[in-house]
Amino acid sequence: MRVHATENVTATLTSEPGRQPEVAVEARTINALLSLPPGFGGQKRDDTANPEQLFGGALTGCFAFAVQYVGRRARADVDGLVCRAEVRVGQARDLGNELEVDVVVELPGVPQEQAEELVANARRYCPFHRAIEGNVRETITVRGSDRGAE
């Protein structure tokens, strides 16, 4: 692999008596306090995020950049591009935890057929998508200019 970028991220588990454990995540421009989602015994807190939210943000952000890249190469109007993800974590058959993700890509300035082609091509440029491909149950829905919101 020819490396284009390297990022260092540190996660530190902290635990105080009477409080849920937290993980402090630090990177160059990110400082986030993570807590367990309520479904895992955590408490909903407005001042924290959870790993699934960070995963969804990383996946959709990276995928949006990939769609923009292939759109630019195809001279397509990708203005207004929106990429959303619903990330679910649940119990697998082996009783361990696994992820599922549904991604929706909206390209309001691109006809549906071309939008689908751009998204298909973008899959190879998003390392997050490549990492989960075959490992995480994923659906990708594409909405071009002639499809609209459903």
Image (cartoon, rainbow, N blue to C red):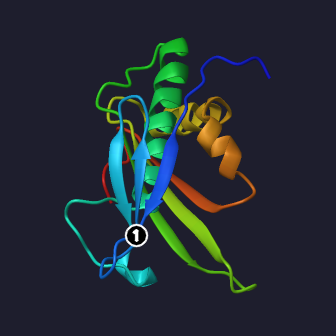
Image-based side of 30 in relation to 65, left or right: left
Q: What residue type is labelled 1?
A: Ser
Please tell me which residue is depicted at 80% across the width and 23% down the height of the picture. 1
Furthest residue in direction right, as rendered? 1
Image location of residue 140, percent across then percent down: 54, 53
Give the quarter of the image for residue 73: top right
Q: Which of 79 and 113 is in front in this view?
A: 79
Compared across the picture, whether 72 is left or right of 37 comes to right
- What residue did someone put label 1 on? 15
Seen at 34% across and 48% down, the residue is: 32
1 vs 21, nearest the viewer: 21
The reply to whether residue 131 is visible in this rendering is yes
- Mark 1, Cα crowd under 10 Å, few <14 / some 14-19 / many 20+, is few
133 in relation to 7, above or below: below
Quadrant housing the C terminus: bottom left
- Residue 139 in the image, given as x and y percentages of width and height: 57, 59
Task: Give the vertical position of 126 relative to 6 (above or below).
Answer: below
Q: From the top left corner, tell me how far across and down residue 137 is, in percent.
A: 64, 64
The total number of labels drawn is 1
Left or right: residue 107 versus residue 127 is left
Residue farthest front in this picture? 17
Q: Is residue 86 visible?
A: no
In the foreground, 86 or 110: 86
Q: Residue at x 62, y 44 (%)?
A: 129
Front residue (pair 101, 15)? 15
Instruction: Estimate the x, y position of residue 14 in percent, counting from the top left.
Output: 42, 63
> Which of the 4 image quarters holds residue 146?
top left
